[in-house]
Amino acid sequence: MTESPQTKAADFRPEPPAADVSQGGIRFDRNELAGSFGDIGTDLPLIVGMTLAAGLDSASVLIMFGAMQVMTALVYRLPMPVQPLKAMAALVIAQQIEGNILYGAGLAVGGTVYSSRRLPCATTSPRTGRSVSASPAPDS
């Protein structure tokens, strides 16, 4: 005896959210765990390639990468995008860029992003005028 599709659909109960993300909570469920394995499959080869090409200390690179992933999650409540790492890895591996230049580039990009966070174009959408930052806009 087989069950009808209506019975299967009625028995389905979605998993409750682990935390209220809209209120600043961090959600960690099976979807986030699966995504982390997907990210490590992309990140690890790029990091190893950059470490070997630039002659960096592997322990320092891995520790700082992990620390920055955690900091990004806690501060911005968002996962770190992989695209900047892909772009930097392509440059470092193809051009055999040295570690000192890589450190300087990281500081320059970090300083630029940090200083540009207060610009109006970085916090509001030109089309709607609403906030697009990670933090909610204050009520007017």
Image: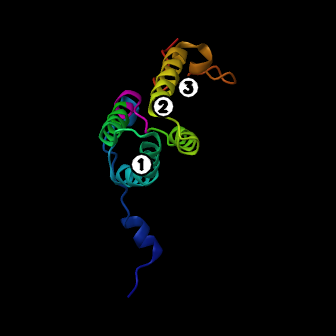
First in sequence: mark 1 vs mark 3: 1
Cα separation, mark 3 vs mark 2, equals: 30 Å
Distance Cα–Cα, label 1 vs label 3: 34 Å
Identify the residue under disc 3.
Answer: 132
Q: Circle 1: is it few (<14), some (14-19), or many (20+) Cα within 10 Å? A: some
Residue identifier under label 2: 102
User: Residue at the spot x=40%, y=80% of the render?
Assistant: 3
Q: Amino acid at mark 3?
A: Val
Residue extent of the magenta highlight = 72-79
Locate the N terminus and report the quarter of the image it occupies. Answer: bottom left
Three-letter code for the amino acid on which mark 2 is drawn = Leu
Q: Position of residue 95 (x, y in %)?
A: 58, 40
User: Is label 3 in a helix, a strand or a loop?
Assistant: loop
Q: Is residue 2 above or below residue 50?
A: below
Residue at image mark 1: 48
- How far across and down, in percent of the image, does residue 65 sit? 37, 38
Position in image of residue 138 (x %, y %): 48, 15
> What kind of element bears circle 2?
helix
Label 2 Cα crowd, 10 Å radius (few <14 / some 14-19 / many 20+) = some
Mark 1–mark 2 distance (CA, rounded to whole Å): 15 Å
| Mark in the foreground, 3 or 2 | 2
Q: Amino acid at mark 1?
A: Val
Q: Answer yes or no: do the residues labelled 1 and 3 have beta carbons within 8 Å?
A: no
Indicate the position of residue 88 as horizontal and vertical percent values: 54, 38
Q: Nearer the viewer, residue 119 or 65?
A: 65
Circle nearer the N terminus (3, 2): 2
